[in-house]
Image (cartoon, coloured by chain):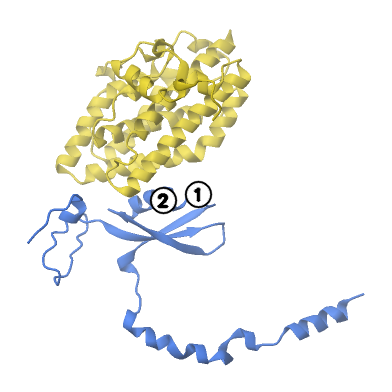
Amino acid sequence: MIKNAIAALIIQMADDELILGHRNSEWTGLGPIMEEDIAFSSMAQDKIGHAWALYRILQEQLNGEDPDQFAFMRAEKDFKCCHLVEMPIGTYDFSLMRHFLFDHAEAIRYDCLQQSSFEPLQQLSKKLKGELKYHTLHADAWILQLCKAGGESYERMQAALEQCFPLAAGIFEPSADEQALIDAGIYPGERELHERWLNSIYPVLVKASLNMPDPAGVKPQYGGRSGKHTPHLQALLQEMGEVFRLDPSARW
Amino acid sequence: MNNQSFDPRVNRLKLGNADEPIRVEEGENWNIYEVFHQEKRGAHHEHVGCVHAPDPQMALVFAKEQFGRRKKCVNLWVVRSADILAFDAEDEDMFANNQEKTYRDASGFKVMEKVNKLKGSKAP
């Protein structure tokens, strides 16, 4: 029973990483400047690596499927990613803000998992610590830089924050199995992670002079964790699995 | 004549005639930063290339993925290229006759004989 709950948690985390990794990779070759193009593409690759590591844990510890099959052959309703990661890349201000909000959430989640009673997650989170540190450093530096510039640059970042905030709150959609996971010491639960996330992004937003929407007045965009998605996901899955589905049994 | 570039950073330099100096303004134009890479703790930082960035912090952020991603790396330095003082290219002649002064080379010191003699005297 607890194994099913752990598997559900891992699928949510991994699907977030895979879908956002794919989304962010859409910027490869189109980034605003060469240095940023390389950095953003490299971090997108990191995310897909995180997804793969999590799917491997499913396969090896929890009787899951082969990671490639699981990633590319599943139906849309079986994906458990949140709506934030499904959204098209839009303009760079949107993609950067999403990167900032998601990666802080991700860093906090893995930070908590360092104390997890589930050994494989504990080990993975220790391994990813340095990588995530760079991701949030990169995100913070850009947010501060673009807000400091003032004018249109600042206005676009504020608008992106308002657009992303309810979507980002959807990362922390509560689930039925959560209490069991908390009781078993697997992780501290979504409510706690949400709190810690707000504490982590707030100082950066203040430094950037951005106005954070009042969390109490925001309606989080839920649904992803129960397989209800925006229309954008289906199109993404189609494209992402296109080559793989030509011959699903091919060896790569 | 003023050609518009596809790169906004170039347009912001407001380039005029070729013989006019280029003014790089803080906060308005980006700078070039030289990147130095340290392979292990205690080793020298070695020059590996440069990045274009709006400030030193962003230069470090870019340099990390640019130069710290493949080879082993424990630290990076970035220095604004304009802050590096160098000789003019035409002053190269100052260094010219160094090569004739071989008596300044460390290779002039014959120590191996003494080292071997010392080793020999310590042999059992």
Residue sitting nearer the eye, B14 or A127:
B14
Task: Give, as a three-letter code, the residue at label 1.
Answer: Arg
Letter of the chain shown yellow in the rendering: A
Q: Secondary structure at mark 1?
A: loop
**Residue A92 picture quarter:** top left
**Residue A107 picture quarter:** top left
Instruction: Write down the chain letter for disc 2.
Output: B
Q: Which residue has dot 2 on it?
A: B66
Discs 2 and 1 carry the same chain letter: yes
- x then y, percent, for residue B34: 37, 62
Q: Secondary structure at mark 2?
A: helix
Q: Which residue has dot 1 on it?
A: B70
- x then y, percent, for residue A222: 34, 14
Instruction: Write down the chain letter for disc 1.
Output: B
Residue B74 in sight in this render: yes
Q: Residues within 10 Å of mark 2 (few under 14, many from 20)?
A: many
In the displayed structure image, the side of residue B29 where residue A40 appears, left or right: right
In the displayed structure image, the side of residue A128 where residue A30 appears, left or right: left
